[in-house]
Amino acid sequence: MVSLDKLIDLKKLPKHVAIIMDGNGRWAKKQMLPRIIGHNNGVKTVKKIVELTRKLNIQVLTLYAFSTENWQRPEDEVSAIMALLKTYLKSELATMIKNGISFRVIGDISKMSKEIQEELKKVIDKTKYMKGLVLNVALNYGSRQEILRACKNLIDKGIKNPTEQDFSDSLYTKGLPDPDLLIRTSGEKRLSNFLLWQIAYTEIYVTKTLWPDFTEEDFYKAIIDYQKRDRRFGGL
Ligand code: FPP
């Protein structure tokens, strides 16, 4: 069998891949394990996919890790996700620096604990001049909140007749190219308040695979599918 990495065109890779990492809970339920074990395994997938995107020289990887709606989950699940995030930041900083990864966050982190905010600021600061992959993690992120915030920023700046560029520059994703490819795992066909402005022309790929089961091969399949699309951006 030809391995899938041989089937991708390295000259036509997406610059920016965004992922809605869904299905951690279902993965755990299927095995009669607590949901947090699903999130734990989800972090293992995060590490694999970050490493692969870096090796492929993809410029930006945006991961939807925690939405503005996720606070509604039981308190013990929320604190377990926060604990996983903290462990991830502490354990991965050295690897990020070694591999030239620049870590960024989109979302309102002021609502997160002081401890997490400090850890996030530390990792952002220590990796800000890295020239390789931009690893952009969405935390307490909601696209409608981001759009409203952009409107308020424009009003504050006194810009009465904003261009699309002015608007893009007021979003958390300022300076980043829009995603070329959006992957959603676990089969749900919805956008869940994720990057609504930025994905106007993004190719969407949905796989039934649950996030903890998502492998490098699955990522290659998404890229192969993306490379077959005829992207016309509204033209002919
Ligand atoms: C979706 O599965 C997953 C989440 C809401 C949390 C994702 C968080 C992590 C993987 C950990 C922290 C992230 C990083 C970048 C280290 P779900 O719980 O909605 O699954 P379900 O729909 O099957 O219940």
Image (cartoon, helix red, strand yellow):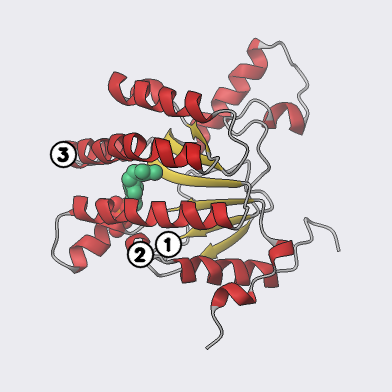
Among numbered discs 3 and 2, the one appearing first in the sequence: 3
Query: Which disc, if any, is residue 185?
Result: 1
Is residue 113 shown to the viewer in this render?
Answer: no
Q: In terms of depth relative to the viewer, which is nearer, 114 or 189?
A: 114
Q: Is mark 2 within 8 Å of ligand 1?
A: yes
- Residue 146 can be seen, yes or no: yes
Give the percent coordinates (x, y) of residue 155.
Answer: 65, 14
235 with respect to 156 (left or right): right
Q: Residue at x 78, y 21 (%)?
A: 161
First-in-chain label (1 vs 2):
1
Q: Amino acid at mark 3?
A: Asp
Q: Earlier in the sequence, mark 3 or mark 1?
A: 3
Q: Tag 2: Cα neighbours inside 10 Å, few (<14), some, or many (≥20)?
A: many
State whether label 1 is within 8 Å of ligand 1: no
Q: Amino acid at mark 1?
A: Thr
The mark found on residue 210 in the picture is 2
Marks 1 & 2, CB-CB < 8 Å contact: yes
Q: CA distance from mark 3 to mark 1?
A: 24 Å
Q: Position of residue 138 (x, y in %)?
A: 46, 38
**Where is residue 224 drawn, in percent x and y?**
62, 71
Residue underneath mark 3: 76
As helix, strand or loop, the secondary structure at mark 2 comes to: loop
Q: Does 9 appear above or below 118?
A: below
Query: Dividing the picture into quarters, in which one does residue 86 lie?
Result: top left
Q: Is residue 236 above or below residue 136?
A: below
Amino acid carrying mark 2 in the image? Leu
- Secondary structure beneath dot 3 equals helix
